[in-house]
Amino acid sequence: MSETFLKRLAARIAHMGRWRGLRTDAPAVPDVPDPSRREFIRAGVGVVGGLAVAAVAPRVAAAAPLITSAGHSAQHGVGHSGNIAVGEVDTTRMAYDPVPFLTQFDRGKVSRLPGGQTLREFKVVAHDREIEIAPGVFFPAWTFNGTVPGTTLRVREGDRVRIQFVNAGTHPHTMHFHGIHRAEMDGVPGVGPGEIAPGGTFTYEFDAIPFGLHQYHCHTLPLKRHIHKGLYGMFIIDPRQGRPPARELVMVMNAFDTNFDGENEVYAVNTVAFHYAKHPIRVKRNELVRIYVVNMTEFDPINSIHIHGNFFHVYRTGTSLVPSEYTDTIMLCQAERAILEVRFPYAGRFMFHAHQSEFTELGWMGLFEVTDDVDV
Ligand SMILES: [Cu+2]
């Protein structure tokens, strides 16, 4: 690391210690301005590793080995990129693992109403919980059902959806679903039940329309803080006739402002920086892969996804069965979503990442491992 980078890092640590009301032994460097995340990138070292040091500096100031280098790349099986975070998050402690999360769908407790309509019942509990967003980088999250993103809820068009929401957190929250429903079920302050106080509960109920890819999130003010803290998840309404069989994957674009300065320091899909670079997503060659992508990134208006060496069909908001684009990159504004369908004709490793290079370098990058193996 360069001397300049070390000075900047020291200033960053001192700044964070002041912000968090924590004491730090790191010396203040008065002639060095507080570096922005972009300056970290320009410093030309392992960016997420550097931020990892900064973010946890008051606790583990000597975490410099977190920074990786090209020499570590081969060791970790990532020949495509040198600068990724070294080490692994503790998925057991977090009770969350991004790999199984890709294919986990909660379809609720299913029964029939007297008129024959299918009823799907869910229970969602809001908790405060510390999560690990990169190795050694912890974030004080607010969660739905203990994880960020929350559980992926999946129903069929026309089903009655009943969600018992319990607020076991320390702040008022709501559940606001995208879709078509009555005003009192919209989960916003001042309408219907409004904010649900800590210890409170409310049951949201509506019919699932329109089919497509939607999301749910807390709508308590200040909204960007309540969403950014982790209170969001994917909500899929399948069309009545279903979609063709495919390997289906959930990707929620998200990011974390670890020092609460209004800018994100860590980016990912499904929370953990570079996790799918270290644990490539295995798919079969030529099989249909359907990717549900929702952008829940706060503070940055736009996010994007690009898949290398392949093209995909795009179903924006998932509300049509006919694709509208055939491309290798799409951008999504905050809360926008799309279903992507792709068949990989060649075996091998293919990167996917945001095409904002800054996001990529701060964690939003992964790999598909395309294989001929039967057992994927
Ligand atoms: Cu909230």
Image: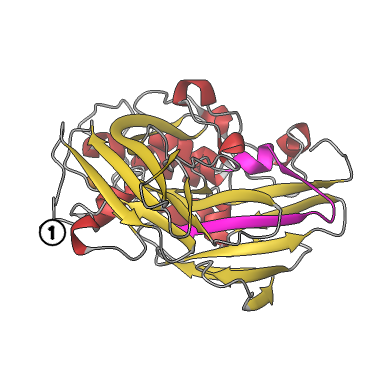
Q: Position of residue 366 (x, y in %)?
A: 65, 48
CA neighbours of label 1 inside 10 A, class few (<14), some (14 to 19), many (20+): few
- Per the image, the residue denoted by label 1 is 191
In the displayed structure image, the side of residue 334 where residue 227 appears, left or right: left
**Which residue is depicted at the point 49% across and 58% down?**
294
Q: State the residue in front, 234 or 327.
A: 234
In the displayed structure image, the side of residue 14 where residue 313 appears, left or right: right
Check disc 1 and give the amino acid type.
Val
Q: State the residue in front, 270 or 110.
A: 110
Quadrant of residue 325 in the image?
A: bottom right
In the displayed structure image, the side of residue 133 where residue 259 appears, left or right: left
Q: Which residues are magenta?
A: 274-295
**Which residue is depicted at the point 51% across and 45% down?**
270
Q: Is residue 131 visible?
A: yes
Q: Position of residue 262 (x, y in %)?
A: 30, 55
**Which residue is depicted at the point 58% across and 63% down?**
339
Location of residue 136 with respect to 115 vertically, above or below: above
Q: State the residue in front, 242 or 80.
A: 242
Give yes or no for residue 284 being in the magenta stretch. yes
Location of residue 227 with respect to 306 vertically, above or below: above
**Which residue is depicted at the point 17% across and 39% down?**
171
In this figure, which colouring scheme has been used for the structure? secondary structure
